Amino acid sequence: MCRNIRPLHNFEPPATNDEVTAAALQFVRKVSGTTKPSAANQEAFDRAVAEIAHVTQHLLDELVTNAPKKNREVEAAKRKARAEARYAS
């Protein structure tokens, strides 16, 4: 999975539309193999991002869990610590 796509479920506050769209954009970039599509492909690229963001938001709205909500700052600190350990020389 693309490392730039972060889990969006079970956070307080919930994922924003911008976060969902950013994840959809990263997914489409990964699948298409391009970060900037040609003019001929721009419409299809943008439509794919919008549709995936829409479906992702529906998924997040419907998921159910009994686990306690995660804190964004704590999770970010964990990611940073893992990255520091991974890239330490």
Image: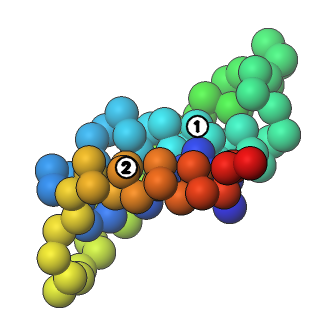
Q: Residue furthest top?
A: 39
Residue depicted at 17% across the width and 86% down the height: 66
Viewer-nearest residue: 56 or 18 = 18
Viewer-nearest residue: 24 or 58 = 24
Viewer-nearest residue: 78 or 88 = 88
Measuring from the top left, give residue 89's x and y in whole percent: 74, 48
Measuring from the top left, give residue 62's x and y in whole percent: 27, 71
Q: State how far apart marks 1 and 2 are (Cα).
A: 21 Å
Displayed quadrant of residue 28: top right
Q: Which SS class for mark 2?
A: helix
Reply above or below: 68 against 31. Answer: below
Q: Which mark is residue 76?
A: 2
| Quadrant (top left/top right/bottom left/bottom right) for the N terminus | bottom right
**In this rendering, position of residue 84 left or right of residue 71:** right
Disc 1 crowd, CA 10 A, few/some/many (<14, 14-19, 20+): many
Q: Which SS class for mark 1?
A: helix
